[in-house]
Amino acid sequence: MHTNKIIVQKWVWVLGFWVLTVLGCVRPTLADVMIIVADKDNTIYSEFDLLSNGTGDHVFAGKTAGGNSRRALVAFDVAGAIPAGSKIDSVRFQLYMSRTQAGNQNVTLHRLLADWGEGTSNAGGGEGSGAIATDGDATWRYTFFDAADPPSSPEWASTGGDFVATSSADRSVGGIGFYAWGSTAQMVADVQGWLDTPATNYGWLVRGNEGPNVTAKRFDSRQNGNTSRRPMLTINFTPAVVCTKGDVNQDTRVDGGDIGPFVDTLVNGAMPGTAEFCAADVNDDQVLDVSADMAAFVNCLLAGTCP
Ligand SMILES: [Ca+2]
Ligand SMILES: [Ca+2]
Ligand SMILES: [Ca+2]
């Protein structure tokens, strides 16, 4: 034990020499990006409680020539794609608008407050008229249609869907082509919430202009044959940092093998929020400094672990 202490003290002198004579620099952060396709999508139709379009090629938002509204429901499996504990930095939601009779119309995203389903209903033709709901489909009245016993189907608290009235994002949609929403602070908050509490992830309701008639926009769904036109969410995020203090080489032990990497990290610097910064910031004060962290590191070496 006494011999070990002498060896460590010699190393301290060497570490101090190197750290004090070389200036540090900053490394890039570990932000990441993920692009995911909708996990489910559907359309609800205002004129009839039993209309849906679970597996159709399209979803709709806005009002028809006949004065009936359509609202699209779109959800993404965020927690299945992004590591738990990550920080969402920005998000971008993309749809492809493939048919309309209307000019520019405002289309808004609203966070849904209740779960809903995508059954096997599949509308014919241009799909604007919908199809009779099948088991598990969302409709204007029902969240999950029960084909065996329709009156017992669970319902929205409010017909037309339960959603936050204030939009998370909005943009004008004109002619045929790709359209993207975000990033906005509210979209980031929505997706962060879905990651942190997956049970509350019901996605967004896509709402068109429900004022005058003939505002409807048809967007391509996740079942569309053209995969590039399916609803997509681009998520920029920073993974959570996992580290053991002092274990700078991340081999699950705090020992002599960490001395070189510890010196390297102090000398070269590391970006806050990275595992190496976390491990080398032994005294956990969010600063890499020669004196305090080295003293703490030496104590860890002597003990074989950090407190
Ligand atoms: Ca669908
Ligand atoms: Ca180690
Ligand atoms: Ca520190």
Image: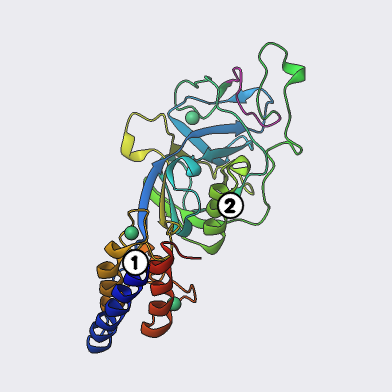
Q: Which residue is mark 1?
A: 29
Q: Which residue is pictured at 40% across the width and 42% down the height?
A: 36
* Local crowd size for mark 2, using a 10 Å CA cut-off: few (<14), some (14–19), many (≥20): some
Residue 86 place in picture, x, y as percent: 47, 55
Farthest residue, direction top: 148
In magenta segment, residue 137: yes
Q: Quadrant of ligand 2?
A: bottom left
**Seen in the image, is 194 located left or right of residue 143?**
left
Of the pair 117 and 34, the residue shown nearer to us: 34
Of the pair 48 and 80, the residue shown nearer to us: 80
Residue 133 place in picture, x, y as percent: 60, 20
Q: Which label number is shown at residue 193? A: 2
Q: What segment carries the magenta color?
A: 132-141
Mark 1 near mark 2, Cβ–Cβ under 8 Å? no
Of the pair 274 and 15, the residue shown nearer to us: 15
Q: Is residue 103 above or below residue 2?
A: above
Q: CA distance from mark 1 to mark 2?
A: 23 Å
Q: Is residue 192 above or below residue 71?
A: below
* Local crowd size for mark 1, using a 10 Å CA cut-off: few (<14), some (14–19), many (≥20): few
SS category of the residue bearing label 1? loop
Amino acid at the residue labelled 1:
Thr
Q: Which residue is pictured at 76% across the width and 37% down the height?
A: 157
**Looking at the figure, which quarter contains the N terminus?**
bottom left
Residue 39 place in picture, x, y as percent: 47, 35
The kind of secondary structure the magenta stretch mainly shows is loop
Q: Is residue 57 above or below residue 181?
A: above
Amino acid at the residue labelled 2:
Gly
**Seen in the image, is 276 located left or right of residue 23?**
right
